Image (cartoon, rainbow, N blue to C red):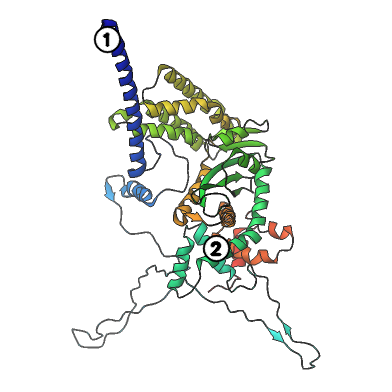
Amino acid sequence: MNMQELWAENAALKKELSSTKSQLEVAEARCALLSQQKFKSKSEKHPGQTELDFDLNEAEVLVDQQTTDEELQVVPEHTRAKSKRQPKLIPDHLPRVEVHHSCDSAVCPCCNETMQPITPIEQEQLACLPSKFYVIKHVYEKLSCKCKAQAPIEAKRPKRAIPGSQISELALATWIEQKYDQGLPLYRLERIAKGANVEVARESLARWIIQVSKNYFQPLVNLMNDAVLSYDIVCVDETSLQVLREPGRAAESKSQLWIRRGGPPGQESIVLDYSPSRSAATCESLLSGFQGYVVSDAYAAYLKLGKQETIDNVLCSDHARRKFKEAYDTLDKKARKGSLADQALQRYGKLYKLEQDYKKADLSHRLQMREQQAKPLWDAFMAWAAKIQGQGVAHHKTAQAIAYLLKHKAGLQTYLQDARLPISNIAAEHVAKHVAVARKNFLFVCTPSGAQASANCFSVIQTAKLHGHHVHKYLAVILTELPKADNPDGFEQFLPWNISAEKVNELYQKLPLI
């Protein structure tokens, strides 16, 4: 073998070695990311990152914060431990059950005289019981006349959510809240009832939920949908749902719950729609006639919407930032500080801090901030990313994050144009997370009608919470009042933004509560 052949073989081996190293780095990064997702904290928080406000912190995080912020109390001369006395836990409005404890003996050990009672010591403890079942006994007055010419007259029977059923609207409201807001699957509700010696089959529960969803929730959701499409900003997302008995599809197939969150100020709505498909055609049909800004991730179906003249894409910065966080997590701990991923996260931190600082500012001041402060930060960020990409990035995950950032830079900066637009799609993602938490418990639904009922229940509950309603009270009131409605106005007056929480509470107190 001559030298030329040796040089060629050496070059080929070097190229093969370089390719193998690259594949190994990708595999190691993927393995590190999977380990991070499986075994470590799933927080996306990064040192120096200002997190936008939301209410999904875990209890452990809150406890740690309390320990850090409140455990030590600083006074002018020294630092001392704060009192361990717990804050008042027991509300005054709860009913009280008294338990009297007597002394072992009322005889004085010194003089053998009978001791007299004085002011006792009182201690209160919070108590609760499992689900309490009770029976509402309706007594309808019946009148007759001595003349015998008139037939007896009975009191008018109110219209029921489920006509002829022995199940009250209060029970329906409880079960719907427990499944779709608290994440309890129907088999657990069946088991809870059985624990109280009440036989309620899960099949019956499912049938009742589908019936009230179709008859009473669907008209409300239609009105909410009108509100979403009437405004020029909508946040969209989707999450999977397994439906076992879909015509022409395998039971293992994944269907979708599409999430849209929007509506004019004061009429904000959250609408979920069931569809077997995640296609662009489904997305377009859900936003048919919409004109304005679509806040979303960079899924191709949403980007296709942005090609229409009447729609602009506002891409979520959380998704772009998340890719840098994944790259950061796959690095060796010693290599993280000062890495390209770390630098990108620090730049995002400054952008998020501006949004947090101006969260309560009026629209004109927020827009001014974005033009004068956020825009220069974005320009510097994009110039830095383009320069880094041109120089070449060895770390595979970081290279992917930079490529994503530059590919979608226009959509990521669209929010700068309008002070009403958010920097991220976290509002819709929170709804998807709520669905995912409940779905983790009930795993699947059996039929398409059950999937649509679930979408309607999620829509009504999430929109009610958005407008400050107590979920159980709101559901109980609308299930009691909507059967009486005989025209669209009867439904409109019970939309979450048309009825106040105070009015709902007033109507709720008139129900047969125990």
Of 132 and 297, which appears nearest the observer?
A: 297
Q: Residue at x 62, y 47 (%)?
A: 268
Q: Is 343 left, or right, of 481 in this rendering?
A: left
Taking 54 as reference, is 412 above or below it? above
Q: Position of residue 158 (x, y in %)?
A: 68, 73
Q: Residues within 10 Å of mark 1 (few under 14, many from 20)?
A: few
Give residue 308's quadrant in the image: top right
Visible in this render: residue 366?
A: no
- Look at label 1 and name its amino acid: Leu
Q: How far apart are the two marked residues, 1 and 2, measured between alpha carbons?
A: 75 Å
Q: Residue at x 44, y 53 (%)?
A: 440
Of 357 and 211, which appears nearest the observer?
A: 211
Taking 367 as reference, is 62 above or below it? below
Marks 1/2 in contact by CB < 8 Å: the verdict is no
Residue sticking out furthest to the top? 3
Residue sticking out furthest to the bottom? 146
Of 4 and 54, which appears nearest the observer?
A: 4
Q: Position of residue 274 (x, y in %)?
A: 58, 50
Give residue 238's quadrant in the image: top right
Visible in this render: residue 241?
A: yes
Residue with the mark numbered 1? 6
Q: Label 2: state its secondary structure.
A: helix
- Look at label 2 and name its amino acid: Ala
1 or 2: tag closer to the N-terminus: 1
Q: On residue 206, which mark appears?
A: 2
